[in-house]
Image (spheres, rainbow, N blue to C red):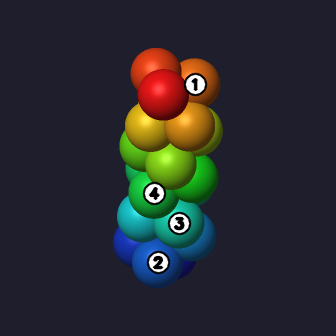
Amino acid sequence: MACGQHAIETAIVLLAVVFTR
């Protein structure tokens, strides 16, 4: 189930990068 959690973290990081642009 770690894969799902990692996917969520990646999505959060991507959103953060997009918002901070």
- Asked if residue 14 can be seen in this view, the reply is yes
SS state under label 3: helix
Going by the numbered disc 3, the residue's amino acid type is Ala
Q: In the rendered image, which residue does mark 2 sit on?
A: 3
Q: In the rendered image, which residue does mark 1 sit on?
A: 19
- Disc 3 and disc 2: Cα gap in Å? 6 Å
SS state under label 1: helix
Q: Are marks 3 and 4 in contact (CB under 8 Å)?
A: yes
Q: Are marks 3 and 2 in contact (CB under 8 Å)?
A: yes
- Disc 4 and disc 2: Cα gap in Å? 10 Å
Q: How many marks?
A: 4
Q: Residues within 10 Å of mark 4 (few under 14, many from 20)?
A: few
Q: Quadrant of residue 2?
A: bottom left
Which residue is more in the foreground, 4 or 20?
Answer: 20
Going by the numbered disc 4, the residue's amino acid type is Thr
- Disc 4 and disc 1: Cα gap in Å? 14 Å
From this view, report whether residue 18 is shown above or below residue 1. Answer: above
